[in-house]
Image: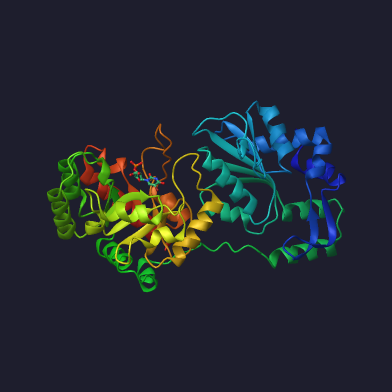
Amino acid sequence: MINKEEFLLKAYKLGIIKFGDFTLKSGIHSPFYVDLRPLASSPELLRELSNHLLYLLKDSQYELICGVPYAALPMATAMSLESDVPLIVKRKESKGYGTKKMLEGIFEENQVCVLVEDVITSGKSLVETIEEVEKEALKVKDIVVVLDRQQGGIELLKNRGYNVFHLFSIGEVIDILYKHSLLSAEEAKKIKEFLEGKPMVSIQKVTRSSYEEKLKVQTHPVAQKLLQIAMQKESNLIASLDVTSSAELLDLAEKTGDQIVAVKLHTDIISDFSSEYVSELKNIAKEKNFLLFEDRKFGDIGNTQQLQFEKGIYKISEWADMITSHVIAGAESVKVFGETTGVVTIAEMSSKGTLTDGAYKAKAIEISEKAGNVIGCVAQSKLPETLLLFTPGVNMTSSGDSKGQQFNTPEKVFKEYHTDFIIVGRGIYASSDPQAEAEKYRKAGWESYKNNV
Ligand code: 5BU
């Protein structure tokens, strides 16, 4: 392997970096322009590069390699050939037909994938790629970059918990080229000044509003109550008590009641439902100060939803403080729940292969923001501040189940999604000590919230 400096000098001859006055995509003028694509025209240099990148990853453990399209694809391919680690290919856009897969290749859930990027500026393309790769239940820990333009991208990713290795920074490139008289002192100075005048990307920690601040914005009484309970109990935990007998449920509600802001229910799985059970549950909720959240996920035309909400044996409208509803039937269908029950719409699901993609989520948010009775959404990514974010699929010891569920940690959902409330099911009710476990999740959720506010 030739050394880094020698590699750069050879690569420079291919025209990978040009000096002058360039207008970047962002409209900003830059005194240099970098394009690493010509490297693929030299098999020798591409191989050298791939070995340098692999060397940066010498202490990392990974089972797959993926390049950020398009410039890093040949680099990732060369790394795969040199290391015998399988490659996966990320599409820039879905095919629009057939499987609509965004990742091509053979891989399994939970495999660790290293990402390869040619030039990092803001880190935006990498963030997008990471999202796609993680959506397929792969894990990303390490990222390797050929050139850092020193505009905040690396810090952004490090802030999100990824390890980022880079072969060169632009400052280093300038020094090497100057040392070899490929750049005049004046040019080098101009570029250094340009770099110091940046970073163009703000690397400040992105903060979220506190529950106190949200309380000022949220006008729905149920949203206000929920936020008040959260502050009083220092908890953002909703226990999803998905058990099938009323005795078991009441027992769990009693045991976890002090730790939570709400119990989430699937009343239709209770085999011995009765009105006595409902009144007992209401009593516990009152005594322990938590809300009743029926996860009915209505998904029909307004008229039917109204019947399902008010009639039948469950009479949900009589006791539920909050309910979940899909918005698949359009804005009108959500109105039937009235003004007093807090509606939480499903904008994005946690399960693998869910159909709630970005376009669906955007439409669900639009409907939710306009509806007076919607207090927030269930989602797996950020929401506008006007809506409270409820995130299920939270578990500290498992990454998923065999039926498509995908789990995240409380830390991740507060840091990355700015969630407001975590919903934990099996993590609590399936443990041998649900009370102690609820306290663990309460603490983890509260600390993660505090760290990001
Ligand atoms: P778990 O045991 O923590 O996986 O339970 C999660 C609960 O949240 C369960 O009751 C689901 O029905 C519910 N849920 C979910 O997991 N994912 C979603 O996208 C939605 C609801 Br919407």
| Residue visible at 31% across and 49% down in the picture | 441
Q: Nearer the viewer, residue 8 or 24?
A: 24
Placement of the N terminus among the 4 image quadrants? top right
Which quarter of the rendered image does ligand 1 occupy?
Answer: top left
Which of the 4 quarters of the picture holds residue 371? bottom left
Task: Specify whether 251 is left or right of 214.
Answer: left
Q: Nearer the viewer, residue 185 or 209?
A: 209
Q: Position of residue 130 (x, y in %)?
A: 57, 45
| Residue visible at 71% across and 35% down in the picture | 50
Which of the 4 quarters of the picture holds residue 243? top left
User: Looking at the image, is 43 positioned above or below residue 147?
Assistant: above
| Residue visible at 87% across and 53% down in the picture | 182
Q: Which residue occupies the extreme front position in the image? A: 303
Q: Which residue occupies the extreme top position in the image? A: 84
Which of the 4 quarters of the picture holds residue 43? top right
Q: Position of residue 218 (x, y in %)?
A: 37, 70
